[in-house]
Image (cartoon, rainbow, N blue to C red):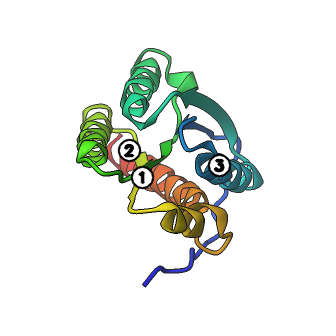
Amino acid sequence: MLRTVRTTRVRAAAERFAIVASRYNARYVDSMVRAARKALEQAGARVELVRVPGAYEIPLATELLARRAATEPASAPGAILCLGVILRGETVHAAHIGEAVSRALMEIQLRHAIPVIHEVLLLENEAQAAKRCLDPQHNRGLEAAHTALEMARVVRQLRSRSA
């Protein structure tokens, strides 16, 4: 059963966040981007949006944002949100793309110690995409934004304790 997105109020006080989103399956991804951006901006965050052709290209843009954070700490995002929709077809291509993206995003997150919020959805059909991307109560872009806000806070707290 699909859960309704639950939100908590977290302030970002001009913190930076980056969204990396695919243009493929734009109807669904654009809805996720709008929901994520709105939630982040309402929390006081500044948002940088990077668009890439498809889901497979998301990890490279994410890696470059994470590297930039290492060389330009003032521009470091509190989190990087990765948004995309992969629809299964008649071959295993979608599964290969989904697995490659998932592995790459986890590696980037651990290598750079920056929260990478993975909402590159591997879905069976357009009905699932509509439910998870177009329905305001289940929009995974909104969920990604709230996860990003919370993880940025958690990382900030952990870093301040170790300083």
User: Residue 59 location in percent, x, y?
Assistant: 37, 31
Crowding at dot 2, Cα within 10 Å, few <14 / some 14-19 / many 20+, comes out as few
Label whose residue precedes the other's in the sequence (2 or 1):
1
Q: Is residue 109 left or right of residue 76?
A: left
- In the image, residue 139 sits, relative to residue 35, either above or below, namely below
Residue 137's tag is none
Image quarter in which the N terminus is found? bottom left
Instruction: Identify the element where label 1 is drawn.
Output: strand
Closest to the observer, 8 or 63: 63
Where residue 142 appears, as percent x and y from the top left, is 61, 60
- Residue at 26% over, 47% down: 91
Q: Amino acid type of disc 2?
A: Arg
* In front of the other: 141 or 13: 141
CB contact under 8 Å: marks 3 and 2: no
Compared across the picture, whether 115 is left or right of 79 comes to left
Report helix, strand or loop for mark 3.
helix
Asked whether disc 2 touches disc 1, contact meaning CB atoms under 8 Å apart, the reply is: no
Separation of residues labelled 2 and 1 (CA atoms): 38 Å
Q: What whole-number distance in Å separates the C-alpha atoms at marks 3 and 2? A: 38 Å
Residue type highlighted by circle 3: Arg
**Residue 46 location (% of width, % of height):** 70, 38
Q: Residues within 10 Å of mark 1 (few under 14, many from 20)?
A: some
Decide which of tag 3 and tag 2 comes sooner along the chain. Answer: 3
Q: Is residue 97 above or below residue 38?
A: above
Residue on which disc 1 sits: 87
Of the numbered discs 3 and 1, the one sitting upstream in the chain is 3
In the rendered structure, which amino acid carries the disc numbered 1? Leu
Residue of label 3:
27
Q: Residue at x 59, y 61 (%)?
A: 133
> How would you rate the neighbour count of disc 3 (Cα within 10 Å): few for under 14, some for 14-19, many for 20 or more?
some
Mark 2 — residue?
Answer: 159
